Amino acid sequence: MQNNTIDSVSNKFEKPIEAVTDKVESWLEVLVEMIPNMLLSVILFILFVVLSRLVRKLFIKVFRKSSDNKALENLFSTIIYYAMLGIGLFIILDILNLDKAVTSLLAGVGVVGLALGFAFQDIAANFVSGIILAFRKPFLIDDVIQVDDLMGIVSRTNLRVTVIRTYQGQEVYIPNKDVLSNSITNYSVLGERRIDLAVGVSYGDDLHKVHDLVLETLQNMEGVIRKDDMIFTYKEFGDSSINFEIKFWIKFPDNPTFLEMRSKAIMAIKDAFDREDITIPFPIRTLDFGIKGGEKLSEMNIGPKNGLGNK
C-alpha cells in the first residue's frame, strides 16, 4: 500500500519535470543554433559603434567648414551617432530572429514620442525655434539687439534660450520661441546707427546761422560718419522756442558708443551756442493776476482778504 502511494506521487511530479526538461533542452538546442548569429551580432554591434563614431567625426569636419555654431554641431552629430546605432540595433535584432521585438520596440518608441510631445510642448517649441535661429542667424554673439522691449548684448545662445546682457548689468534668459515670435532689432548688423537730437532756439536768433553752426559743429566731431548725410530740419514753432531736429550717423557698436556720442553731441552744440550767443530758451509762462486780464502785478492793490484789494 505504501509503495503504491509513492509511485502515485512520483508519477504526478514526473510529467512536469519532463516538460521542464524538454523545454530546457529545446532552449539549449536553439541557443546552440543561434551561436553563429550571436557572434555575428556582436561583431556587427562593434562595427556599428566604430562606424557611428567615424560618421560623426566626418559630419563634424564637414559641418565646421560651413558653420561655427557649436550648438547645432553637437545636436546633429549626436543625432547621427545614435541614428547609426539604432539602425545597427534593428539589424541585429532581425539577425537574432527577434522580429516581434523590433515591431514592439518601434511601436513603443512611437507611443513614448507622442506622450513626450504632449508633455514637453514648450521645450519642443524652444528646441525647434533654436534650430531655426541657428540657421537663419538674425544675430551673432556680442551683437546689440532688441527683442520686444528688451535691449542688450547677446551673451550666448543654445537650443533652448537666448541670453541677453542688459545695459543694467543683468542677464535675461529669453525662450527661443519668444525670440522667434517677436520682432528682432539688430543694431550691430550694419555697423552704424543714427542719433536723433531735438533742440530749440529762441525766436530772436538767426535760423540760418543756427543751421550752419550745428552742421559744422557735428561734422568736426570725432566718431561721426556719413557727414554729408546729416539731416537738419526745423520742426515747429514752440511756446517759447523754434524747435529743430538734427540726425547724424556714428559707428556702432564700436567705441565711441551710442550714449557717449549722444552726450558729446549735446555738449558740443551747447558750447557752440554759448560762443555765438545763441539762446536755448527756458519755457516761459506769463501769470496774469488782473481781474480783467492784462493788468500788471505791480499796479494791483493786494489786500488781506481774498488776496485782492479794492481800487
Image (cartoon, rainbow, N blue to C red):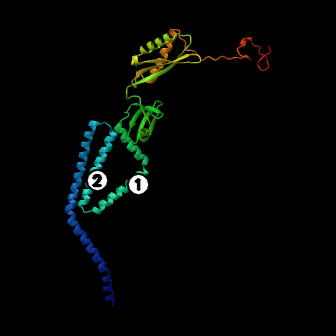
When asked about the image quadrant of residue 185, the answer is top left
Q: Mark 1 points at which residue?
A: 115
Most foreground residue, 247 or 81: 247
Secondary structure at badge 1 equals: helix
**Disc 2 crowd, CA 10 A, few/some/many (<14, 14-19, 20+):** some
Say above or below: 78 vs 198.
Answer: below
Most foreground residue, 286 or 75: 286
Percent x, y of residue 306: 78, 21
Mark 1 or mark 2, earlier in chain = 2
**Disc 1 crowd, CA 10 A, few/some/many (<14, 14-19, 20+):** few
Percent x, y of residue 71: 34, 40
Please, what is the three-letter code of the amino acid marked with disc 2? Gly
User: Quadrant where the N terminus lies?
Assistant: bottom left
The residue at the far left in this view is 36
When asked about the image quadrant of residue 65, the answer is top left
Q: Is residue 173 visible?
A: yes
- Which disc number belongs to residue 52? none
User: Quadrant where the C terminus lies?
Assistant: top right
Q: Mark 2 points at which residue?
A: 86
Is residue 204 left or right of 69 when viewed as pictured? Answer: right
Task: Identify the residue shown where x is 44% and y is 15%.
Answer: 218
Please, what is the three-letter code of the amino acid marked with disc 1? Ala
